[in-house]
Amino acid sequence: MVSDVSTTAGSWHDSAVPTLKFDRVVVDLPSNRASKLRRLNVAAGILHLVTAAVMVAVGNRSFSLPVSGFNIGGPPGTGLSDGVLSELFSVPLAWSVAAFSMLSALFHFLIAGPSFGQYCQELERGRNRFRWVEYALSSTLMMVLIAMTTGVTDLAALIAIGFANVAMILFGWIMEMVNDPDGDVWWSPFWFGCVAGIGPWAAIIGALVFNLSQEGAEGPPGFVYGIIVTIFLFFNCFAINQWLQYRRIGKWTDYLHGERTYIVLSFVAKSVLAWQVFANTLIE
């Protein structure tokens, strides 16, 4: 059944905000193309699983990053010099790096296996909610780990970074839900997602600049800068992929080309981060 969501906002609504049609088939998905996507998901799942297994098997499982909390030791307005900085717990890096690869593997196997029929139905409707749930988990874990490797340890800051990233992903979800690949496009969710996505990177870069500005500061090791640059570029590639899909430019006039690109980008981005961290901090 087609479910229409509309308001009484008149002609402005008609031209700017699309009606939601959750069950309308808008993408042609022949069986041969569905089979290719299934094989691609299986291959990506296997590669993610192998990466995770290597991280755990030969990585330095004793290496961890601290998570801290700060108590000002008095009522609001108390000087920071009276506060106490405490280590709340530590995060084992090898297991954490393996975790986002395992999450990706789980979702690839899920949609290539028991949920394949539902996955195909999603694609025929110009969306993939499996993707956005997986990204909300795995990419958020990636962002938090990147923040921690650059020196962000405060629990509240890490929580804020994580939820800002989740907000960005959910705006991507909304972008697919309210737009058809071949219809008029409502761009607000896309741009709101870009704004939300700036937050984690602003926090990471701001903390890095502050730490480097301190007298006698050595800064993080060189590989951390490599992580920041490469993952920042990959994160932007996801946004560019969606932009190309809804601008219908070149091969992206085919929604399924964008889906394949998402799968490849996801694997490459996670693998690059995993192996950069592994090569520089996790080799025993």
Image: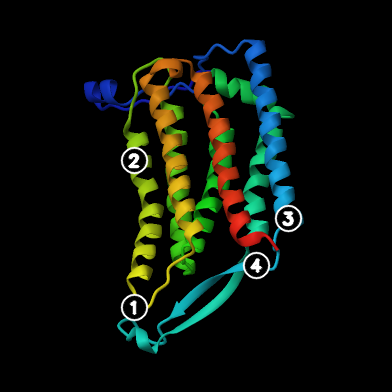
Label 1 packing within 10 angstroms: few (<14), some (14-19), many (20+) = few
Q: Which of marks 2 and 3 is nearer the N terminus?
A: 3
Query: Where is mark 4, residue-wise?
Result: 63
CA distance separating discs 2 and 3 = 37 Å
Query: Where is mark 2, residue-wise?
Result: 192
Q: In the rendered view, tell whether residue 278 sits above or below residue 31.
A: below
Tag 4 near tag 3, CB within 8 Å: no
CA distance separating discs 3 and 1 = 37 Å
Q: At x 38% / y 28%, what residue is drawn?
A: 243
Expressed as whole percent of the image width and height from the top left, the position of residue 172 reads 44, 36
CA distance separating discs 4 and 3 = 12 Å
Q: Is residue 186 visible?
A: yes
Q: What element carries label 2?
A: helix
Q: Of circles 4 and 1, which is in front?
A: 1
* Res. 56 mark: 3
Which residue ends up furthest to the left in the rendered image? 11
Q: In this view, does 204 lie to the left or right of 138?
A: left
Expressed as whole percent of the image width and height from the top left, the position of residue 198 reads 36, 49
Label 3 packing within 10 angstroms: few (<14), some (14-19), many (20+) = some
CA distance separating discs 1 and 2 = 38 Å
Q: Identity of the amino acid at label 1?
A: Glu
Q: Earlier in the sequence, mark 4 or mark 2?
A: 4
Q: In the rendered view, tell whether residue 221 sits above or below residue 177.
A: below
Q: In the rendered view, tell whether residue 108 sits above or below residue 271.
A: above
Tag 4 near tag 2, CB within 8 Å: no
Q: Identity of the amino acid at label 3?
A: Val
Q: Is mark 4 on a helix, strand or loop?
A: loop
* Res. 215 mark: 1
Rendered-image quadrant of the N terminus: top right
